[in-house]
Image: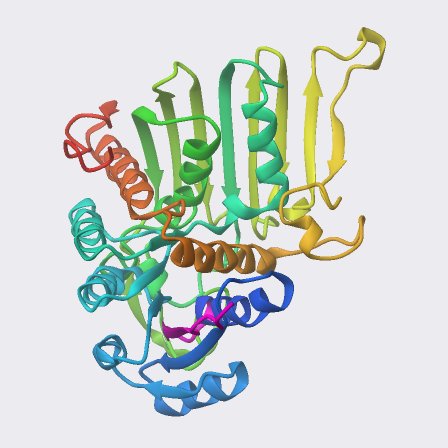
């Protein structure tokens, strides 16, 4: 067979997600039999020195200072969007218009209107598109989906999700871009609940109505200085100079799914002691499932069909070769971690490009999440329950 042409990658963004994605592009061909080889053609960041160091460390062949220059290059096939949400739409739409496949970090966009434009652009261009809700590709969550599809927990009645962090609990933590609406869109409601909503759509089904309460606890913070970033305070520019926090600090949602199940969502960065606790529980007529990202190799399962004297939640260690993705890594009992979920996304994305098939979650899935997030914020502002399926979902967009 003739040798496949390399898939040439350009990445926009060199911080937290840029590192996670770069590692994934490097590791995917080492552990998965990809249909095309990978070339890391160019990395793009605003700071020349930092971007050159990033490129050297991660093996990118060249650097760009402006994402427009990156997108315009004719030696790149894929644009990997790892910049703050405020730039997602501009970069992704331009990439699609240039005929490039697009992998985009979550949440997909700042607004529903932006997400609609992004989906229209990739559909018009006929390119492969994926939004990186990477937790779908945790082996234990894939096993949960398998159990649900096999009917092991029966009809689903309840979904309960909590996503808890504490990295801004200190009131002197600086005002990074995550705390400014114009850059982030929202706080943990968008950043964390977007993950939980994606998993709910994946495992339970479409959300139909939503009621939401949001809260802000710290209203002003020091302006950021050198080194301030996600999870890192760095230095403050001036302890006396402060700026206003314009996103919520916590969000609580109650929802009803189209299949009749009900659910709750909590997202907060003020859960003292919880570093990245992404947990869900699903209760059905025949059994239940529970997962916690801080114990991400485990899935809890309860079955009503066990003998009465033996009933109870069992913990399945999801590291066997028969488990989703696990057979590509280490022997049973040798656990994997957060970074592996990005590798799984890249491996599936490259395969989808090669075979010309869609990959999920795609931009349509990302738009569906944004519609729920926006409806929830409308509910929080108005004090009313909001129906997601009509006014928040344009006709035909998500079909």
- Left of 354 or right of it: where is 366? left
Span highlighted in magenta in the image: 1-16
Residue 382 figure quarter = top left
Q: Residue at x 45, y 83 (%)?
A: 60
Counting from the top left corner in percent of width and height, residue 238 is at: 36, 79
**Is 190 displayed left or right of 336 in the figure?**
left
Can you say whether 147 is above or below 135 in the image? above
Residue 15: say if magenta. yes
Residue pictured at 33% horizontal, 71% vertical: 77
Taking the view exactly as shown, the residue that stands out farthest to the right is 309
Q: Position of residue 228 (x, y in %)?
A: 43, 74
Instruction: Look at 77% across and 13% down and name the residue there.
Output: 306
Specify the quadrant of the image occupied by residue 5.
Answer: bottom left
Nearer to the camera, 332 or 367: 332
> Which of 309 and 362 lies nearest the eye of the viewer?
362
Q: Is residue 70 above or below residue 164?
A: below
Q: Nearer the viewer, residue 167 or 82?
A: 82
Residue 168 visible, this orientation:
no
- Toward the top, the furthest residue is 308
Looking at the image, residue 44 lies above or below residue 162 = below
Q: Does residue 388 lie above or below 341 as drawn?
A: above
Residue 249 covered by magenta stretch: no
- Residue 335, image x, y percentages: 74, 53
Image quarter hosting the C terminus:
top left
Residue 211 falls in image quadrant: top left
- The type of colouring in the image is rainbow
Q: Is residue 306 visible?
A: yes
Q: Position of residue 152 (x, y in %)?
A: 62, 19
Farthest front residue in view? 1
């Amino acid at each position: 067979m003739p040798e496949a042409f390399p898939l040439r990658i350009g990445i926009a963004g060199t911080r937290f997600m840029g590192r996670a994605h770069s590692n994934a592009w490097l590791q995917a061909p080492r552990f998965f039999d990809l249909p095309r080889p990978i070339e890391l053609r160019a990395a793009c960041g605003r700071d020349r020195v930092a971007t050159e160091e990033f490129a050297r460390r991660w093996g990118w062949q060249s650097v760009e200072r402006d994402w427009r220059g990156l997108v315009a290059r004719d030696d790149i096939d894929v644009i990997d969007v790892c910049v703050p949400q405020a730039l997602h739409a501009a970069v992704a739409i331009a990439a699609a218009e240039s005929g490039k496949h697009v992998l985009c970090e979550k949440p997909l966009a700042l607004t529903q209107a932006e997400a609609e434009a992004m989906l229209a652009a990739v559909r018009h261009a006929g390119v492969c598109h994926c939004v990186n809700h990477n937790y779908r590709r945790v082996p234990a969550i894939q096993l949960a989906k398998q159990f649900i599809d096999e009917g092991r927990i029966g009809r689903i009645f309840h979904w309960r999700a909590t996503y808890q962090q504490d990295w801004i609990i200190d009131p002197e933590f600086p005002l990074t871009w995550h705390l400014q609406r114009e850059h982030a869109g929202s706080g943990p409601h968008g950043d964390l609940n977007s993950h939980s909503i994606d998993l709910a759509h994946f495992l339970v089904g479409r959300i139909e109505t939503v009621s939401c309460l949001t809260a802000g606890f710290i209203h002003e913070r020091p302006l950021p200085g050198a080194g301030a970033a996600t999870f890192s305070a760095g230095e403050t520019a001036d302890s006396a100079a402060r700026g206003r926090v314009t996103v919520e600090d916590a969000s609580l949602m109650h929802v009803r799914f189209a299949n009749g199940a009900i659910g709750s969502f909590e997202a907060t960065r003020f859960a003292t002691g919880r570093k990245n606790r992404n947990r869900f529980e699903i209760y059905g007529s025949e059994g239940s499932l529970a997962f916690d990202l801080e114990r991400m190799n485990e899935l809890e399962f309860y079955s009503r069909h066990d003998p009465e004297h033996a009933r109870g939640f069992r913990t399945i260690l999801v590291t066997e070769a028969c488990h989703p993705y696990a057979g590509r890594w280490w022997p049973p009992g040798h656990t994997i971690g957060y970074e592996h979920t990005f590798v799984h996304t890249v491996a599936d994305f490259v395969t989808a490009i090669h075979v010309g098939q869609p990959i999920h979650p795609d931009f349509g899935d990302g738009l569906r999440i944004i519609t729920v997030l926006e409806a929830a914020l409308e509910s929080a502002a108005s004090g009313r329950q909001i129906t997601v399926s009509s006014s928040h979902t344009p006709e035909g967009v998500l079909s």
